[in-house]
Image: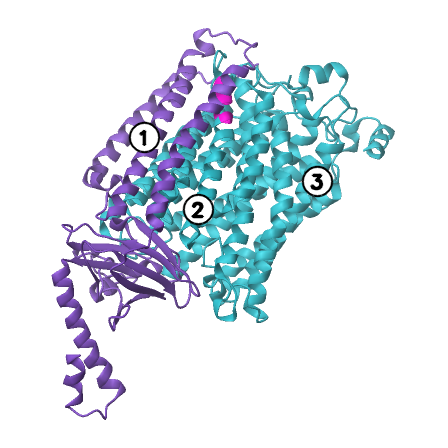
Amino acid sequence: MSFQMKNRHARRVLQGAAASLFATLASVAHAGWDGLNMPEGVTVLSKKIYGLHMLILWICVAIGVVVFGAMIYSIIKFRKSKGAEADKTLVHSTKVEIVWTVIPILILVGMAVPIAERLIDIEDMTGVDLNVKVTGYQWKWEYEYLGQNVSFFSTLKRDSDAARQLGSGVDVNTVPNYLLDVDNPLVIPAGQKVQFLLTAQDVIHAWWVPAFGMKKDAIPGYVNHIWVQVEADKVGTYRGQCAELCGRDHGFMPIVVEVKSPAEFDEWLRAKQAEQKLADVAPNAPAVTASAAPAAIQQ
Amino acid sequence: MAHEHTADHAHGEHDHHGPAHGWRRWVYATNHKDIGTMYLVFACIMFFVGGAMAMIIRAELFKPGLQLVDPQFFNSMTTMHALIMIFGAVMPAWTGLANWMIPMQVGAPDMALPRLNNFSFWILPFAFTLLLGTLFVPGGAPAGGWTLYPPLSLQGGDGFPMAIFAIHLMGASSILGSINVVVTIMNMRAPGVGLLNMPLFCWSWLITAYLLIATMPVLAGAVTMLLTDHFFGTSFFSASGGGDPVMFQHIFWFFGHPEVYILILPAFGIISEIIPTFSRKPLFGYDAMVYATAAIAFLSFIVWAHHMFTVGMPLAGQLFFTLSTMLISIPTGVKVFNWTATMWKGSLTFEPPMLFALSFLFLFTIGGFSGLMLAVVPADFQYHDTYFVVAHFHYVLVPGAIFAIMAGVYYWLPKWTGKMYDQKLGTWHFWLSTIFVNVLFFPQHFLGLAGMPRRIPDYSTQFTDWNMVSSIGAFGFGLSQLLLPYIIWKCVKSSGEKATSHVWEGSHGLEWELSSPPPYHSWTDPPSGDVIKRGVQH
């Protein structure tokens, strides 16, 4: 005995509701079409990773068309209400079952090749031009340019920090780069291979700039590596944030990277070195005479 | 079994040997149906408690800026929502369905170990009182994520040991329940009900039970090490003491990956029952379905590190885990193809159980696709810990596991109560759930790809639009779920349309050979050869 739903009216109401809902969604979404897909990024690796993402996405879409097509066809074609009779003998077919086991295996083997190639690219840490040690803290980042005597902390910018407080009354839409701005951005040169050595002081964090195509965990007691080579013409500012839950203010430790041309980067680095020498000397050795400090800077 | 049998016969009619009255019926319960009912009611309560937490999360994320809760409390909500939905809603719901259905499906009078059954249920209210109690102690509820990664989880306050004790209790309850399922299926099958012709729901639960028995002690070990690290000065996971924080993740996910199959395999079983019923056709490729389930269970033990590709692994490790993970899509694909082939040349009708099963079929497959994408390590370095992952696992758990539970409830409710429920309302429940679940979770794919990390209470303004859409979907989805208890309540209380023993035109299996509602001690006499012939799978 079957109990079928016979109320066509209810069905029509539901269809109407669904249609108007999707219309609303489309208009809400209009402003956000850019934000639908992974960014292609600006590094040598990020474009390859993006390519792999699109490849697997289209494979899924193709499989989806076939599988969903067969499901939708069955739902439309084999309805009892349309007089469909069940073919109770159709319960097994070795041939078909082999086909739908072997085809996915072939697809997976085909995918394994580009995956392995990209992984080897990602793990290739040779020919590094600059090493930056990144240390995660609750809730800020420390950047240390290894061998350059430059290191500094990078924390959420004050206007964002003020606006994000519970009941701050600030309209966050008026804050430029809300939650994605810092006091001291990391600066790296375009066109050069920069290796990041990631670690953490307290809990696990993860360093992620989507435009660079990579994220990796910063773990106490570990040093993880990633490398980034921003294409020479992609000078600019790139933003990201901590990607591993690290406590109360996990959402408030952004990453900002300024990518400069190598010449500008060198200039910035020299200025930073000079500034840090002064800063180091001043608090640690108050007794140093005025003549010693300039000598140190000239090195 | 033999003992109970004679006892029943001594009493003559089994109706005479009915339930105790009042609270004793429930507290002293040893009957599989009563315990099954308690599990299902408990799961339903926890579903709404966990759902309320999800509503807080989505309300805070409705627009950028912090409007409602402190970030620490937000983290507690994401953590507790996951723990409650996994251990409080989905797993007890499966155990409840197993309790109700397995004895009826294998031709047994009850579960094999009725007192153990009582114990495994009654642990749960205590476990969740402890877990929910953490919300009211200094330091608040656990806020380090349900995965409890150290060192962060070690920063928890007074709630930390309570949560660990609660997890131990839940694990003990699951292990006891699983032992009961294994013993029942292995020993209580009526003569003539072979392993390879019992319903797929029994098969998938048998395999799930083994997964639970194998992995729950691993979780217990992991959280015990957390406990000793916190209180007894050990350094299992503390780098400064010579320990290794990444080791916790390996141990946790060695439990955690089989755990996600524990949540979904019984769903595969239920869908394999419902689609043939409403296609009026036997399941396509029964043997392949059994082998595919076993293959998925085996593979679940060798893929754990795909949850943690970003911790930094050797190249060979990354390749191994990416390939073994992709391998899972083959048996899973076989299942989806077999369900589709079952509908092929069938004679389909669309009652609420079938509607939920179809929704499962489409939306679980979408979750499978995003899972395949996540298996691709280089791309996973982008997807990892973003809303793309949130979308993925909610697609496999909400329209996957939870829709399958609902499909099962709508499928068997007339059998349980002997009365037909309001199918029109059930159909409304289906449409509202299916539409809103997509409004809720599909935009989260976009958010993740565009760069929104998960577990953040506030976000930068470019993510506003899709978060609003997602939150609207969440409120709609949450409200529509209130229909479920209402429909069940109405069915139980009303003197509605009587259900026949077969209930559905195409239903097929031993449980449908019993009256609706079934006798208190399901199969007091083992089903006869003819009944088994009618009822078994093929």
Local packing at callout 2 (Cα closer than 10 Å; few below 14, some 14-19, many 20+) is many
Q: Is B502 within the magenta?
A: no
Please indicate whether residue A160 sits to the left or right of residue A208 in the image: left
Rendered hue of chain A is: purple
Labels 1 & 2 near each other (Cβ < 8 A): no
Per the rendering, the mark at residue B300 is none
Residue B341, given in percent of the width and then of the height, sits at: 49, 17
Chain ID, mark 1: A
Please indicate whether residue B260 sits to the left or right of residue B309 in the image: right
Q: Mark 3 points at which residue?
A: B180
Q: Nearer the viewer, residue B189 or B355?
A: B189
Magenta-tinted stretch: B334-341
Separation of disc 1 and disc 3 at Cα?
A: 45 Å
Please indicate whether residue B481 sits to the left or right of residue B37 in the image: left
In the rendered view, tell whether residue B34 sits above or below residue B460: above
Q: Which of B322 and B100 is in front in this view?
A: B322
Q: In this view of the protein, can residue B499 be seen by the observer?
A: yes
Q: Mark 2 points at which residue?
A: B318
Amino acid at the residue labelled 2: Gln
Separation of disc 2 and disc 3 at Cα?
A: 38 Å
Number of marks present in the image shown: 3
- For the view shown, which residue lies furthest in the front direction? A127
Q: Name the residue under label 1.
A: A58
Q: Which image quadrant is residue B387 in?
A: top left
Chain ID, mark 2: B
Amino acid at the residue labelled 1: Trp
Q: In this view of the protein, can residue B458 be seen by the observer?
A: no
Q: Which of A79 and B235 is in front in this view?
A: B235
Q: What element carries label 2?
A: helix
Amino acid at the residue labelled 3: Asn
